[in-house]
Amino acid sequence: MLQKVTVTNISTGKSVVTLIDADTEEKALIGCGISGNESASVENIVGLDETVHRIGLKKPSVEDRAQFFSGLARCLDRNIGLSKGLQLQSNRVKSPVYKGVIGDMVCSIAAGEKLSEAMAKHPALFPDSILSLIMAGEEAGQLSRVCRRIGNSEKKASKIVAKLKNGLIYPAVVIVLAVVVVIVMSFTLVPAMAKLFESFHAPLPLGTRALIFLSDILIHQPWMAILPFVGLYFFFKNWGRFCSQHWVQDVALKIPKIGLIVRKSAAALSFRTLAMLVDANVRLSSALAITAQASTHYHYRTLFNKLGEHIAIGRTMHEGFLMESHWLGPDARQICGLIELAAETGTGTEMLNEIADDYEEELDSLAGQIDKIMEPLTIVFLGTIVGFLIYAIYGPIFSLGDVILPHGKKH
């Protein structure tokens, strides 16, 4: 349930409105981060009003998760109680969902539950990889250390994600503008052009016929002009689900530069997760299974599942990596060498962290160049649209001479 909390400063009289996604007023008040010199009133947002508000609602982000765990680790380091430490994170996170979850976790801990049990109720925000780390931290008495490691890892991820998003703004704008241009032309230029061409009774190229067909549809059914924008909205909204398809991931790996970003991002996440799990003394077989589940690319998901099978029958990690190295792509030989070094020196956690650091540094460098990487693809897309329009509009014009002055006509 979406709730609107109006927080008023008693000293100054100024009010701030905060949206909280919580199921009770008590949780909403906790999630808004109210302090001692403030009063608050809660109003439920229901029906159509809630639907409208949720359209523009800020979604939970990697940055929110990084801020949450970093702040919680700082509180635990200073022996601040867990319940109070969670409440102090209410003003650090920006998403109404996270604010509501904080309120729910505070109530769960007040009822005697562990932090891991409270987090387990919200798998969308705290996946199994994080939940396992929290459980291991609770058992080892190192919860603050584990939270700090998660916070640092998420901060690195948030910086990379921000660079990637910034680099994708330009292609997204170009795609939207291209759709707008085609729709506007379908309502204005194409109908006049169609009348001209029909008056000569000349055969039209396929591209021209397709453009006229699209124009006829939009003129007789104008509401269909919004369909491309609805399609783009759902495409970007379900981007994660679309990218999880195996054939999409295979195609992405074959695209120059883009394939490197996809592979290195998946590898960095996988090896960082495994390093944190091993460092938290999670059993290796369980750590591999959790890492496989947390992996964003099915190549690495398959790799770590296979490694778990090799470990289960008594093989070493190095042997497993050698047998499944084909999932690692061009970095396979280097990774296997590092795993062998870790096995010989007994520095498994350090080596896994080193592998993750290397991938993250390379990914950060590539993410900084994403605009230059996407520019050629954007130009190809734009050139295709422009070329099609030029062919569809001017192609018949070049052949009008044959219609106006047929071959064999004497001057």
Image: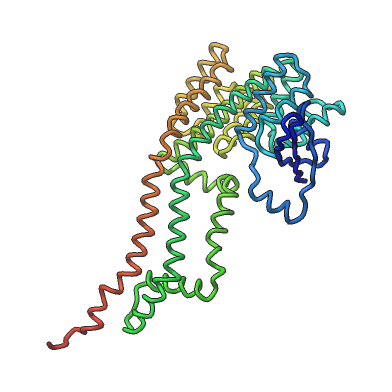
Asked which quadrant contains residue 260, the reply is top left
Toward the viewer: 379 or 336? 379
Percent position of residue 176, x then y:
47, 55
Up-down relation of residue 202 to residue 117 (above or below):
below
- Asked if one can make out residue 104 in the rendered structure from this viewpoint, the answer is no
Please count the marks in the image: 0
Residue located at (58% from left, 45% from top)? 240
Identify the coloring: rainbow
Asked if residue 102 lies left or right of residue 310, the reply is right
Depth check: give the residue in front, 370 or 35: 35
Nearest the viewer among 126 and 338 is 126
Looking at the image, the residue that sits furthest to the front is: 12
Residue sitting at the far top:
345
Q: In the image, what residue occupies the spot 51% across and 23% down?
A: 357
Q: Is residue 89 visible?
A: yes
Quarter holding the C terminus? bottom left
Residue visible at 45% across and 24% down?
334
Residue beneath the point at 56% across and 50% down: 236
Counting from the top left corner in percent of width and height, residue 181 is at 43, 61
Is 197 situated above or below 380?
Answer: below
**Seen in the image, is 108 located left or right of residue 353?**
right
Q: Is residue 160 left or right of residue 31?
A: left
Q: Residue furthest left?
A: 411
Residue 378 picture location, percent across and down: 40, 49
Whole-percent x, y for residue 24 in the image: 83, 40
Judge whether 409 appears above or below 125 on screen: below
In the image, is 76 to the left or to the right of 345? right
Q: Residue 373 appears in which quarter of the rendering?
A: top left
